[in-house]
């Protein structure tokens, strides 16, 4: 399949003024010449008539200096369906075939135009919902993450070479500094990998988005609150306790971070089997959430809120009132006071909602912002780094030099799987199947 000449529409679907058709493969020049009459000058946009199909701007991109590393071309066509169908039929007649999802980027990887971390960044950049996600993906696409891992691989190669020298030339009276240098560099590398792993999943959280669960007892205004934060009717609002039986979700952007807000069933002793299941699901969603928003409500005629209402926390590891637990008092339009450490709002009038949004945005940023080296963004990277860290730990305590060398080799292979330099054939189909056609 890699020898085929492929094509696909790279612009968005639907009716548009302009559509971009990409072509790549060893027969690209012949196909382009047959379609246009002649191949235009390289890397210059040229107006060409495509037989009786269309009048288009055409760019010829000879390899290896193209996105895929192969001979490529782009056709800037009028966006009508008849034009696209006609050009596609003509390309098939000339021996090209429609591209599979991600096939252009896969060829770029196979031809050495990018490593796997950069290929994954292409997908993340296309899927980015927010500026923060875009910046993270673009930084990875620029090669920052791959450069970090390749730097560690280079250090491991030097370590392995010195370790092999200690094994192969035991009678050569190598200076004792070699053994000391191996040990020191091994410890330094272990520390760098451990620090990279100890990131509280900031990069993965930003890439995937956070989950904020809204919990509390019935009738404190959880559904009204999620509707107010989302700016639309997500949940049914009713004075009847137990109206929300299942978890309802909506996606919002807070502080440049995509956040899924989850409205959960009111926490109480359930009166029937269905509500009991809703309460169980509410506790499970709160337990898995990144942040729990605990909602209580002012009661008309009370001077202050009962403390046990404020303490209705569903997630044990958030009940210390830390940054991952945000306490809300709703219905402040009814009067009463707001206990210390809580945010007073009225989902009905909007009072206090801006302060709440600012607090939620700050929490979202705090959970995803990172400084220094580029953060981990994929579970695949984390698994490989954890394996590398385990192998480095084994090397540090190995009794025999040969066992230490073997652990260093296995650590090197684990790092290589991240960038795609070794052992990635089994993941390529899964990875690139997530891409859109034309990329």
Image: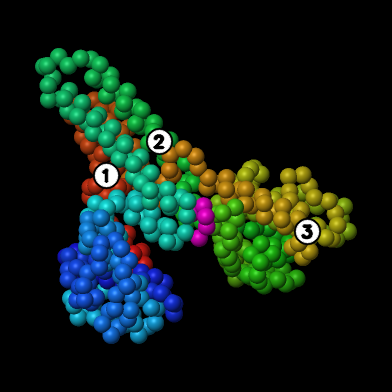
- Contact between labelled residues 1 and 3, with CB atoms less than 8 Å apart: no
| Secondary element type, mark 2 | helix
Examine the image and state in which quarter residue 25 appears: bottom left
Badge 2: few (under 14), some or many (20 or more) residues near its Cα, within 10 Å?
some
Is 131 contained in the magenta span? yes
Looking at the image, residue 316 sits to the left or right of residue 309; the answer is left
Tag nearer the camera, 1 or 2: 1
Residue at 30% in and 40% down: 150
Residue at 27% in and 79% down: 50
Badge 1: few (under 14), some or many (20 or more) residues near its Cα, within 10 Å?
many
Q: Which residue is mark 3?
A: 351
Q: Which residue is mark 1?
A: 416
Between 30 and 128, the one nearer to me in the picture: 30
Residue 241 in percent (x, y) is at 72, 68
- Give the magenta range: 129-133
Is 421 contained in the magenta span? no
Image mark for residue 194: 2
Residue at 24% in and 81% down: 90
Query: Which of the two labelled residues, at mark 2 and mark 3, occupies the earlier sequence position?
Result: 2
If the image is split into quadrants, where does the N terminus sit? bottom left
User: In this view of the protein, can residue 218 be seen by the observer?
Assistant: no
If the image is split into quadrants, where does the C terminus sit? bottom left
- In this view, 240 is above or below 291: below
């Amino acid at each position: 399949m890699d020898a085929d000449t492929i094509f696909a529409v790279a612009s968005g679907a639907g009716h548009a003024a302009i559509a971009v058709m990409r072509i790549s493969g060893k027969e690209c020049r012949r196909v382009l010449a047959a379609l246009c009459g002649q191949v235009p000058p390289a890397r210059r946009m040229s107006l060409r008539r495509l037989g009786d199909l269309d009048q288009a701007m055409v760019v010829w991109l000879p390899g290896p200096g193209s996105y895929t590393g192969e001979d490529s071309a782009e056709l800037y066509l009028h966006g009508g369906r008849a034009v696209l169908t006609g050009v596609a039929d003509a390309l098939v007649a000339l021996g090209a075939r429609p591209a599979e999802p991600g096939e252009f980027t896969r060829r770029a990887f196979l031809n050495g135009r990018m490593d796997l971390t950069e290929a994954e960044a292409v997908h993340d950049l296309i899927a980015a919902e927010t500026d923060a996600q875009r910046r993270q993906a673009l930084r990875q696409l620029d090669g920052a993450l791959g450069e970090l891992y390749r730097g560690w691989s280079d250090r491991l190669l030097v370590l392995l070479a010195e370790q092999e020298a200690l094994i192969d030339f035991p009678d050569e009276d190598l200076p004792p500094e070699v053994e000391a240098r191996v040990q020191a560099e091994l410890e330094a590398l272990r520390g760098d990998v451990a620090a990279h792993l100890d990131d509280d999943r900031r990069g993965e959280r930003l890439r995937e988005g956070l989950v904020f669960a809204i919990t509390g007892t019935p009738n404190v205004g959880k559904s009204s609150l999620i509707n107010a934060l989302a700016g639309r009717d997500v949940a049914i609002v009713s004075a009847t306790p137990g109206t929300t039986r299942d978890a309802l979700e909506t996606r919002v952007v807070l502080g440049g971070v995509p956040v899924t807000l989850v409205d959960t069933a009111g926490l109480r002793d359930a009166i029937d089997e269905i509500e009991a299941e809703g309460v169980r699901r509410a506790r499970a969603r709160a337990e898995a959430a990144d942040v729990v928003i605990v909602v209580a409500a002012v009661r008309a005629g009370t001077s202050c809120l009962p403390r046990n209402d404020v303490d209705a926390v569903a997630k044990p590891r958030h009940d210390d009132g830390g940054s991952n637990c945000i306490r809300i008092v709703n219905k402040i339009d009814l009067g009463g006071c707001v206990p210390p450490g809580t945010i007073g709002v009225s989902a009905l009038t909007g009072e206090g909602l801006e302060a709440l949004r600012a607090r939620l945005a700050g929490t979202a940023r705090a959970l995803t912002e990172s400084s220094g080296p580029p953060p981990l963004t994929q579970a695949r990277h984390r698994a490989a780094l954890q394996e590398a860290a385990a192998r480095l730990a084994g090397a540090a305590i190995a009794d025999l030099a040969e066992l230490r060398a073997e652990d260093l080799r296995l650590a090197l292979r684990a790092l290589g799987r991240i960038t795609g330099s070794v052992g990635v054939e089994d993941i390529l189909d899964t990875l690139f199947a997530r891409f859109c056609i034309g990329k």
